[in-house]
Structure formats: structure tokens, C-alpha cells
């Protein structure tokens, strides 16, 4: 069971208080009418499934009811950071910190 | 029967306290301090069960959680039955009743046993797949007999009388295993001031120290254990959990511990005590001191009772005062195993010979044995055991390990006990639960824990540190590191003095060669619990199963409750040799929780019976109970389903309730509808974006029905929302959808449109709702309210504030029945009183309480949908013929609009909601029935739709249904057919889904 730091409550809490809501940073197109069916389908249905760093949307459902993002390693399940909606992740697959985590994860 | 194998002295048992118990119907006696296994061995019980596949007689092999054979059924009554208890882990108590889990007619004379003699050629791996494959339809017949033959214990048929519990805990350092390394780690971590939990699966802390012949500071090791435990018990931050197996190592240092609180006291917990507890522990740091299991050697007939592990025999002799035989032969490849020889001699028993695979062993214990006159045959091994129900002799041959060959005809030595030791396998299970791959160390011939991301340290034998002095030092080191990791200062500790022995390396030997090829030799068992033989593993590799995971699944190696504790490494070694690769290349299979079986009781804890799930009741629950309501579960809610009168069944009650609403007035408890209070200057704009229809022009005092869609354009909730003030709305949702809708609103507000000033508050529980419905509802309500109910003053789809039954109320004039209706909302704690006043006033108006079933029928007569019953996540508003509820010109592209304009959502021939009128008015279509146009067509038929709702309508005097039918709206008047499972066919006409009062005159009066 994961131990998740809620950036709104400022506390580490157990996974059972949270709901995972899928991949983070998928903005709703500002003008849906301008999207082709293919583009709209991409927004609706297609998600990344990386081995390694993944940015996810979570909600502290049985807590403050606030949404936030988490950067999680999909091999080790390590949560490298949590951050509020509108903020940018500091750990990314392109960054050096991530590479190190992946290296650790692969051997773990 | 007396305790024939009990030694005159020794052991940690209390000989002044005898305990009577029974096994397979026979009475025996043991002592306090015995395990069931020790007591069975003391009484000379050789056969404890029959093997899983070949029904061969099996005896006790080990002394701990690695025991593969003595897996028994416990319990004297049906309610007390526990399947699959390891006799080696069950403390003996007075009156214990145990039996074998298989064997027919008994374990001693098993008719299936014939298989064990001829088997192998008859039942190779994949036997069931290959043999019972054809004809396919006979599998069910085969399966019945195969299952009976296999036998794995049985679950109790009566309710468990015991209570279970669980506890959430946090600690700085969790130490798993209370042997030498674990105790040393606990001592230093505890002294640092850290909050420590020490868990150990055995009856007593101490592990191997309780039975070792080695001394600490010149005294028996158990004295040091007593001293350490006393110090730990005096530390307020240290929790000692005996009889507690850490069975799962989960993410982020979350570990689960299965503690057996009273299993040692009796089959039912003493009054006021719990049977077991599950500890759910979040640890800052973990020390794994799980020890190692001795690995048996694989030789012919190594499963005959009387073949045991060397260490286990030492444990029985020294800890329990039991000698499971008279004449012992040891087959070994290492120094440690010589300790059993010395222990056996100390007990005054005969050592026939030692076969050592090494050419010239000269370690301290070897020399000590030699000095005491033990015959040691070097470069040799026990190649084959003789005997059927008990070992009668061992054949020892010279072997060539490099070329896997027997090099001498050998000699046959009479004996009744063969003990073997192939080295130690560290218990890496917990260290591997999170995916960490164990690493093979050729120097010690063992897998040790690999790297883990978790904050954990391994100490002692699990780390491959097998010597006692080193294990203690390793434990201290790990305990200090863990305490420091958790933020405490390191403290020093002195390690007790251990006599240093010269230990020589272990010779790599797993399967002992035989004069015949493996496939022709007598069976050489690798996994005793699953009856996997060396020949079976070789066959698997020959048939092309090269990956360790495939070999495991094809042969069942390491399956079941055993999880590969004894057999895995030997199996890997045999597969690797067969494939011509190294063990490191072969790798291990995944280790998964649970380490040993966990009872359902411990998993469930208090969450059983009435407490299985939280129940939600409305404010009127007591009235519903007094008035005989039958209830239905809607999510967690208990809703009145119908109110039967004496002698009435569901259909009778529902028909009466329906007619009462249509002809007089009914009252429904609608409190469970989700209610969300929405406030803020942008509340109206927000509603525009989440509902399919327009909200811009909804005036204060009015209410409107809305459909909510997902981005794909599919309906996912509906309900009425009222405008309370220009920036204040009250939204209602379906009963089951309330939480989902709340999260839906929040996600859009928080992640997409944070600039909108709007706030959502769940008020479902704050308001109780009672719906008055029927032509008499106005007259009735007028008697209990000060609100002007005149049809012009209070028209349809508006709401008013006022007093009802003497308390403040919001009354909504909305209708889910098609009748004149008022929904009265009052603060929940006044609701019961208001409800009772309305019931009293309603007597002269023919007021009838009705439940959800009547509500469903009445709404279906009107063609009103229930989201989740008439929709299934693939239905757009247009599919429901509810295009009137779609704001096609709203400026903002609301949720669902783009989705429902995708090509597939606008095509012809989509399934559309229509009414069905069965041609035979007495026939009620089953909900879910598939519809076809031609019932005579060959199977598979072309299905054109399915029934979503179906009822007998008392008001219409015929049955009705709603259905999703391909292109249904164009096919009004056509016929469809529902071919049913029993072969009958119901014919129906496609009609409008509004069956009753199509113009809606009744609700607008």
C-alpha cells in the first residue's frame, strides 16, 4: 500500500484515502469543435503506459477532496514527488534524477 | 500408545503437564511445549498424509514453516475446522483433534497408493492436460474424481465462533525474525530509543538458538535468549509479537503480520479473547532476519517416511526431547549437518554412517564426529532409500559430482532414519515480494536478497551469513543501521562470545546421481507437497519449457501453500543442469505474498456479519421497520423496497401500491437521492458546462431536469436541479451516483476551470425527502403546510419555501410518477416527525406508503429512464429519444457535446430506447433478454437489441417493457421476439416508451 504525501494537507497518508485518476497533464482542448474525431479520440482514450516515470492525477478522496499530481515510478512504485494542479513536475523522464531512478528501478 | 520416541530427558517441554490429543481418530499424549508435529513423532506416527498426486505415504520432514507434508485438518466440531495447518507450526493443546487431509479409506491403506508405485510413467507432468483433454464435455466428470483424489483439506461449513481483529501500527524499525540476528538487531535498535516491533513466527523467540549445541559466553544459547528478551520487554517502545508471521512485504515499507493470539490455547479462543490479529505496519525501516531453510538432497525414494532434514532432527532431539528413529544415516555436502550426528550421539542413539559428498572433509564438527567413532564415507551420498511406509535401509554409493555419476555399487546399510542436508537456502521471500530479484552466490551456493528500493537491511542467515558469531555481528550492524536510518543515535552492543569452528566450504550437490538415468530410477522428489520429481523437471525441459516460470507452471514446482520453501533451489539446479546453463542464468521464480497461508478470519477482522459494510439509513428507518417494509440495497443505502400487507407477495404489494398512487396518493422516502449544494457567482455557468441542457434562463424558484454526460457523449447521471437564488442551486443526483457526481464536479472545477468561482457541498444527509404523489397529494399536503398550493401559485417544475408539519421545508413540485407530486424536503432530524404527521393526515385521503419497486413501475409506465438500468455507458441522449434535453446551441462546448457528435454516435441503426408491449399481456419479458426479428433463424441469431426494464403494470392491465433496439425509433409498430433460455419465445410490439398519460395531463393539474 502506497504512502502518499498530500500537498494540500502536508502529510503522508495511506493509499486507501486516495483515488488514482489516471495520467496527469491531459488538458481538455479549449475548442473541442475544432478537433477532428481522431484528435478528440486521442484526448478521450489514449494514454501513455511508460516503464519508469509517470505523472498521475490523484484525489485525496477520503481527506481534503483536493486533486493533485504525483510523479510515480511504475517499476518501483516509488513516488518521487507530489505537486498541486497547475504546477510543473520537477522530476521528468528527460531529467537526470529520473534516469537515476529508472536505473535503480530496473535493478530493484 | 505410549510416547515411544520420547527421550528420557531434555527438551524445552514441560513433562509435568501431559496433553491428550487425537490424530485420525486415535488418541495420543504429548506435553506442554510440543508442537503437534513433535507430539506425533514422539508417538511414533510415521505417516501423516498421502501425497497430492501419487498418493504415496508421507511423514514429517521439517520442524518449521517449510514442512511440506504434515499439512493437516484441525478441529473437533464443524465450526472449529481449520484446513491446511502445518503440524510443525501448531502448538499442542489439550483435546486437539487433527486428521490427514487425504487418503482413502485411510492414510495407512490408501487405494490410490497403487499410483505411487507405478506412477511417473503413468502420471508425468501435464498428465491431466494430456489425458483428460478429450472428449471435452467429459471434463466435468473427470474433475469430480480428480479433486476427490487430490484432497487439500476442507473449509468449515458452520460459522466461525471466534473473533478476529486488526491493528494499524507505525514503527521506526520492524524486525522480522527473532533468531540470533533478529534478537541482536532488536537489542541495539531498542537501546537507541527507536520504536521497535519484533515479530517471530514460532511459539517462542530464539529461532535456532533454542536447539543449537553451540554456546554463547560459554552457556547454553537459550540463556542469552532469556536475558535479551527480558531487556527488550523492559523497553517501553519495543513491542514483541510472538506467533506472528510477517507474511507480506508491500509498497513503501508496509508489512502485514498475521499473529495467532490464542491458537495455542485451544480450537476456540477463551472467552473474551481474540483468536488472531492482523497487524498492518508502516515501518520507517525494516530488518529482515528471516533465517534460512535447510535444503534436502534429492535422491531416490527420498519421500518415504523416515527421510528428514538434518536440522529438523536436531531440533526435535534438543528442543522437544523426541528422537524420530533409532538408527541414523546422514547424507551431506557441508559441515553444519554434522551437528545432528553429535546431537544424536548425545541422546544415546546409534549413528550408522555419514555419507559426505566431499572427498576430504576436515572441519571441526567433522573431526569431532570422527573422534567419537562415527563412520564417515567420503565422496559418497545416499543414492536410494529403501522401505515403503518407513525407511528400512539406505544405499550409499561413491559418486562423481562433476560428471553426475555413481562410481561404486555401494553398500546397503540398515537404518530407520535418513537425514540429508544440501546446504542452506536463505528465506528471501519477503525481500523479493516487491520484485527484488535474489542474487545467486556461488561461494555459498545460495540465493541472497537482491537490492531493494525500500529502506531495509538484511541480517544473518538470510544474508548468507550462516555462522553463529557472524550472524550475531551482522544483526547488531543491521539494528544500528536501521535505528540511524530512522533518525536515532547509534548505540554500541557487545556480541556474546561464540566458540569458533573451522568450517569448510559446501560441495555443490542438489540431485544425487543414480545408477539409472533419472527417468528410469525410482522417484527422486524435488517438491514433496506438489509431487514434483527430478524426472518431471527434466521432462519439462525436454518438452521445451526453458524459462523458470514455465517449468514451474508445467510441473507445479513451488505451487500451493508450500511456495517453494524446500524444493525451489533443487528444482532450479536440476532444470539448469538439464539445460546446460548455470543456476544464476536460470534465475528464480517470483515470490509473492503470502509467505504462509493466512486465515480469512484474520483478513476480514471485524468486517463480517453485520459489520461487513457500512449501512446507511434514512431518518424514517424506524417507521419503515415498524410498518413491515422489505428492504433493498442501493449502494450502501437500505431503501424500502415494498410494504407488504399480511399475505401479500412482492407482486401483490406492488400492484396495490401502484394503483394507490394512480388513484389516490402515495408516499415515498426519497431521502437517498444525492443532493449537492452549489454556490458562487459562476454556479450557473458551471451547470451549463456539466449538463447537456441550458441553465442560463432558469429563474429563481424554478427547477429543471438535466442529463449529465461524459466527454464521450454517453449519459452517466441525471436529476433535477433547482435555482434557489441567482448564485445558489441545489442539484439532485441518482442515489448510487452521488459520490461519483461530486468527484466529477470537483475534478472539472479543480483541474480544468479553476477560474470559475463555484463551491460544491454534499448535503445528501442533511435533508430528508418525502415524495407525495397522486391525485390526492395537493389536498393532503394542504393540511400540513402553510404554502399556497394553488396550481397557478405553485406550478409544475417550481419550488417553494414554507412550513410543513410545523418545521421549515423546501417543497419541489416535480414528478417521477407522472402524477401530481410534491417532494417535501426538511432537515433530516425533523423528518420522522413530519413523516408521521403526513401519514396521520393522509389516512382520510387513502395515503399509501410505497417503495422502490413501485417507483420503478410507475416511472416505466411514463417512460422515465433510470440511469444505469436503461443506460449502460454506451447510450447518448439522442439514443434515449431525449434530444429535447440537448442544448445544441449552447456557446460553451459542454461536457459530452463534442463526444456525441463523433461519427459513430450519429449513425443510423444505433440502439435506441423504445417501449415494448408483449402481445400476450400476461407475459413479462425478463430484463436483459435479447431481441431478434426472426425467432426461427439458425443460431447464432442476429440480435437487434435487449430489454432494459420490464414490469407488470397494474394501471395499464398489461405487461410493459423498455428496450434498446437497433434503429428502434423508426420501427414503432414492428414486432420483435425474445427467445428465452427455456425455449419459449415472447413476442412484443415496439411502441412509444411513454405508456401512460402520454400528454402529461395528470402531472400538470
Image (cartoon, coloured by chain):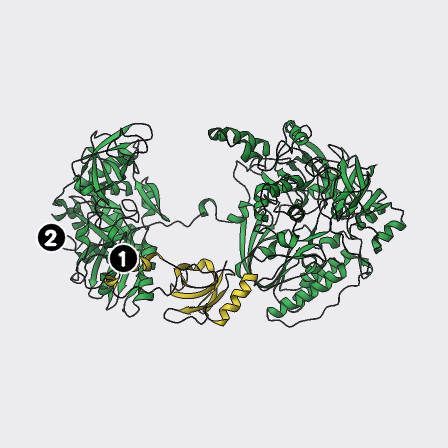
Chain colours: A yellow, B green
Q: Which quadrant would residue B289 be assigned to in this image?
A: bottom right
Q: Which of the pair B50/B558 is nearer the observer?
A: B558
Q: Are marks 2 and 1 in contact (CB under 8 Å)?
A: no
Going by the image, does B753 lie left or right of A77? Answer: left
Q: Nearer the viewer, residue B705 or B821?
A: B705
Q: Quadrant of residue B97?
A: top right
Q: CA distance from mark 2 to mark 1?
A: 51 Å
Along the viewing direction, whichever of A94 and B54 lies nearer the viewer? A94
> Is residue B69 shown to the viewer in this render?
no
- SS under mark 2: loop
Q: How many marks?
A: 2
The image shows residue B207, relative to residue B654, as above or below, that is below
Return the x and y of residue B980 as percentages of the image width and height: 31, 31
| Label 2 crowd (10 A; few <14 / some 14-19 / many >=20) | few
Image location (x, y in percent) of residue B608: 48, 46
Q: Horizontal placement of B300 versus B165: left or right?
A: right
Chain label for disc 1: A
Instruction: Tell me the chain of label 2.
Output: B
Badge number at residue B790: 2
Q: Residues within 10 Å of mark 1 (few under 14, many from 20)?
A: some
Residue B901 in percent (x, y) is at 23, 55
Residue matched to label 1? A37
Residue drawn at the location 19% of the way across and 64% of the way down: B891
Q: Residue at x 49, y 72 (%)?
A: A96
Horizontally, is B320 left or right of B815 in the view? right
Query: Can I make out residue B702 in this image?
Result: yes
Number of the front mark, 2 or 1: 1
Which quadrant of the figure contains the N terminus of chain B?
Answer: top right
Residue B455 vertical placement versus B911 (above, below): below
Amino acid at each position: 500500500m502506497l504512502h502518499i504525501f498530500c500537498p494540500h494537507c502536508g502529510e503522508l497518508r495511506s493509499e486507501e484515502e486516495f483515488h488514482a485518476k489516471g495520467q496527469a497533464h491531459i488538458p481538455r482542448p479549449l475548442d473541442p469543435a475544432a478537433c477532428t474525431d481522431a484528435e478528440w479520440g486521442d484526448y478521450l482514450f489514449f494514454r501513455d503506459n511508460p516503464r519508469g516515470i509517470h505523472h498521475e492525477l490523484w484525489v485525496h478522496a477520503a481527506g481534503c477532496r483536493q486533486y493533485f499530481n504525483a510523479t510515480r515510478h511504475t517499476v518501483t512504485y516509488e513516488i518521487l514527488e507530489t505537486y498541486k494542479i497547475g504546477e510543473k513536475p520537477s522530476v521528468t523522464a528527460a531529467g537526470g534524477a529520473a534516469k537515476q531512478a529508472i536505473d535503480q528501478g530496473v535493478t530493484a | 500408545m505410549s510416547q515411544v520416541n520420547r527421550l528420557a530427558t531434555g527438551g524445552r517441554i514441560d513433562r509435568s503437564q501431559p496433553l491428550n490429543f487425537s490424530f485420525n481418530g486415535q488418541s495420543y499424549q504429548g506435553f506442554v511445549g510440543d508442537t503437534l508435529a513433535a507430539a506425533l513423532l514422539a508417538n511414533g506416527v510415521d505417516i501423516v498424509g498421502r501425497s497430492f498426486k501419487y498418493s504415496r505415504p508421507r511423514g514429517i520432514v521439517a520442524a518449521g514453516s517449510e514442512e511440506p507434508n504434515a499439512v493437516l485438518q484441525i478441529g473437533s466440531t464443524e465450526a472449529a475446522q481449520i484446513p491446511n495447518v502445518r503440524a510443525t507450526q501448531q502448538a499442542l493443546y489439550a483435546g486437539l483433534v487433527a486428521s490427514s487431509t487425504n487418503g482413502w479409506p485411510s492414510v495407512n491403506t490408501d487405494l490410490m497408493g497403487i499410483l505411487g508405485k507405478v506412477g511417473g510413467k503413468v502420471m508425468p507432468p501435464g498428465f491431466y492436460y494430456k489425458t483428460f483433454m478429450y472428449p471435452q464435455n467429459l471434463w466435468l466428470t473427470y474433475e469430480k474424481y480428480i479433486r476427490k483424489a487430490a484432497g487439500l483439506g476442507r473449509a468449515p461449513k458452520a460459522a466461525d465462533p471466534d473473533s478476529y481483529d486488526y491493528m494499524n501500527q507505525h514503527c521506526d524499525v520492524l524486525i522480522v525474525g527473532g533468531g540470533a540476528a533478529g534478537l541482536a538487531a532488536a537489542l541495539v535498535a531498542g537501546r537507541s530509543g527507536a520504536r521497535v516491533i519484533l515479530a517471530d513466527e514460532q511459539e517462542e523467540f530464539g529461532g535456532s538458538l533454542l536447539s543449537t549445541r553451540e554456546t554463547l559466553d560459554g552457556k547454553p544459547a537459550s540463556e542469552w535468549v532469556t536475558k535479551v528478551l527480558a531487556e527488550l520487554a523492559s523497553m517501553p517502545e519495543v513491542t514483541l509479537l510472538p506467533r506472528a508471521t510477517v507474511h507480506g512485504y508491500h509498497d513503501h515499507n508496509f508489512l502485514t503480520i498475521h499473529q495467532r493470539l490464542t491458537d495455542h490455547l485451544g480450537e476456540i479462543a477463551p472467552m473474551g479473547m481474540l483468536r488472531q490479529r492482523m497487524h498492518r505496519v508502516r515501518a520507517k525501516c525494516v530488518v529482515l532476519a528471516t533465517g534460512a531453510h535447510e535444503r534436502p538432497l534429492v535422491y531416490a525414494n527420498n519421500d518415504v517416511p523416515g527421510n528428514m532434514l538434518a536440522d529438523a532432527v536436531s531440533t526435535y532431539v534438543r528442543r522437544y526431547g523426541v528422537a524420530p528413529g533409532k538408527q541414523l544415516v546422514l547424507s551431506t555436502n557441508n559441515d553444519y549437518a554434522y551437528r545432528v550426528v553429535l546431537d544424536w550421539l548425545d541422546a544415546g542413539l546409534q549413528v550408522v554412517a555419514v555419507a559426505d559428498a566431499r572427498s576430504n572433509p576436515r572441519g571441526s564438527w567433522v573431526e569431532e564426529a570422527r573422534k567419537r567413532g562415527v563412520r564417515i564415507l567420503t565422496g559418497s551420498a545416499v543414492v536410494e532409500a529403501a522401505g515403503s511406509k518407513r525407511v528400512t535401509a539406505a544405499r550409499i554409493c561413491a559418486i562423481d559430482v562433476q560428471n553426475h555419476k555413481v562410481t561404486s555399487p555401494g553398500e546397503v546399510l540398515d537404518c530407520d532414519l535418513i537425514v540429508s542436508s544440501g546446504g542452506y537456502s536463505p528465506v528471501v521471500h519477503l525481500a523479493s515480494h516487491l520484485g527484488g530479484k535474489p542474487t545467486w552466490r556461488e561461494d555459498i551456493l545460495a540465493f541472497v536478497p537482491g537490492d531493494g528500493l525500500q529502506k531495509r537491511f538484511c541480517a544473518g542467515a538470510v544474508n548468507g551469513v550462516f555462522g553463529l558469531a557472524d550472524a550475531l555481528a551482522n544483526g547488531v550492524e543491521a539494528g544500528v543501521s536501521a535505528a540511524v536510518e530512522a533518525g536515532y543515535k547509534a548505540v554500541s552492543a557487545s556480541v556474546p562470545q561464540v566458540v569458533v569452528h573451522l568450517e569448510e566450504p559446501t560441495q555443490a550437490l542438489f540431485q544425487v546421481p543414480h545408477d539409472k538415468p533419472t527417468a528410469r530410477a525410482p522417484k527422486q522428489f524435488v517438491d514433496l507437497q506438489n509431487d514434483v520429481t527430478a524426472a518431471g523437471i527434466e521432462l519439462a525441459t525436454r518438452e521445451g519449457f526453458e524459462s523458470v516460470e514455465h517449468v514451474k507452471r508445467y510441473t507445479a514446482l513451488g505451487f500451493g501453500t508450500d511456495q517453494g520453501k524446500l524444493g525451489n533451489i533443487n528444482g532450479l539446479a536440476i532444470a539448469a543442469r538439464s539445460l546446460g546453463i548455470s543456476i544464476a542464468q536460470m534465475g528464480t521464480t517470483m515470490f509473492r505474498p503470502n509467505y504462509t497461508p493466512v486465515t480469512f478470519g484474520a483478513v476480514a477482522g471485524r468486517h463480517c456479519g453485520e459489520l461487513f459494510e457500512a449501512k446507511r439509513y434514512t431518518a424514517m428507518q424506524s417507521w419503515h421497520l415498524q410498518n413491515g417494509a422489505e428492504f433493498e440495497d442501493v449502494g450502501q443505502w437500505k431503501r424500502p423496497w415494498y410494504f407488504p400487507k399480511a399475505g401479500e407477495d412482492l407482486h401483490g404489494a406492488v400492484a396495490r401500491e401502484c394503483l394507490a398512487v394512480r388513484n389516490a396518493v402515495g408516499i415515498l422516502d426519497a431521502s437517498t437521492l444525492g443532493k449537492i449544494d452549489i454556490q458562487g457567482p459562476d454556479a450557473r455557468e458551471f451547470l451549463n458546462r456539466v449538463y447537456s441542457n441550458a441553465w442560463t434562463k432558469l429563474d429563481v424558484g424554478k427547477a429543471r431536469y438535466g442529463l449529465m454526460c461524459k466527454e464521450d457523449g454517453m449519459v452517466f447521471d441525471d436529476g433535477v436541479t433547482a435555482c434557489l437564488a441567482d448564485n445558489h442551486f441545489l442539484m439532485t443526483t441518482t442515489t448510487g451516483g452521488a459520490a461519483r457526481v461530486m468527484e466529477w464536479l470537483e475534478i472539472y472545477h479543480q483541474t480544468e476551470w479553476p477560474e470559475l468561482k463555484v463551491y460544491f457541498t454534499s448535503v445528501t444527509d442533511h435533508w430528508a425527502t418525502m415524495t407525495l404523489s397522486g391525485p390526492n397529494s395537493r389536498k393532503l399536503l394542504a393540511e400540513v403546510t402553510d404554502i399556497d398550493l394553488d396550481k397557478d401559485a405553485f406550478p409544475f417544475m417550481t419550488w417553494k419555501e414554507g412550513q410543513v408539519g410545523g418545521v421549515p421545508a423546501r417543497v419541489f413540485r416535480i414528478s417521477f410518477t407522472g402524477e401530481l407530486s410534491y417532494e417535501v424536503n426538511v432537515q433530516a432530524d425533523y423528518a420522522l416527525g413530519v413523516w408521521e404527521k403526513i401519514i396521520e393526515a393522509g389516512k382520510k385521503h387513502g395515503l399509501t406508503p410505497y417503495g422502490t419497486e413501485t417507483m420503478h413501475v410507475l416511472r416505466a409506465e411514463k417512460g422515465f429512464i433510470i440511469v444505469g438500468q436503461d443506460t449502460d455507458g454506451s447510450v447518448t441522449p439522442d439514443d434515449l429519444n431525449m434530444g429535447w434535453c440537448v442544448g445544441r446551441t449552447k456557446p460553451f462546448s459542454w461536457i459530452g457535446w463534442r463526444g456525441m457528435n463523433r461519427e459513430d454516435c450519429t449513425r443510423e441503426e444505433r440502439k435506441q430506447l423504445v417501449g415494448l408491449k408483449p402481445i400476450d399481456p400476461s407475459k413479462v419479458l425478463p430484463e436483459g433478454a435479447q431481441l431478434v426479428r426472426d425467432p426461427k433463424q439458425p443460431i447464432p441469431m442476429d440480435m437487434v437489441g435487449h430489454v432494459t426494464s420490464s414490469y407488470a403494470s397494474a394501471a395499464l392491465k398489461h405487461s410493459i417493457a423498455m428496450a434498446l433496439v437497433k434503429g428502434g425509433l423508426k420501427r414503432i409498430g414492428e414486432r420483435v421476439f425474445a427467445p428465452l433460455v427455456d425455449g419459449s419465445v415472447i413476442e412484443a410490439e415496439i411502441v412509444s416508451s411513454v405508456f401512460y398519460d402520454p400528454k402529461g395531463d395528470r402531472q400538470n393539474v
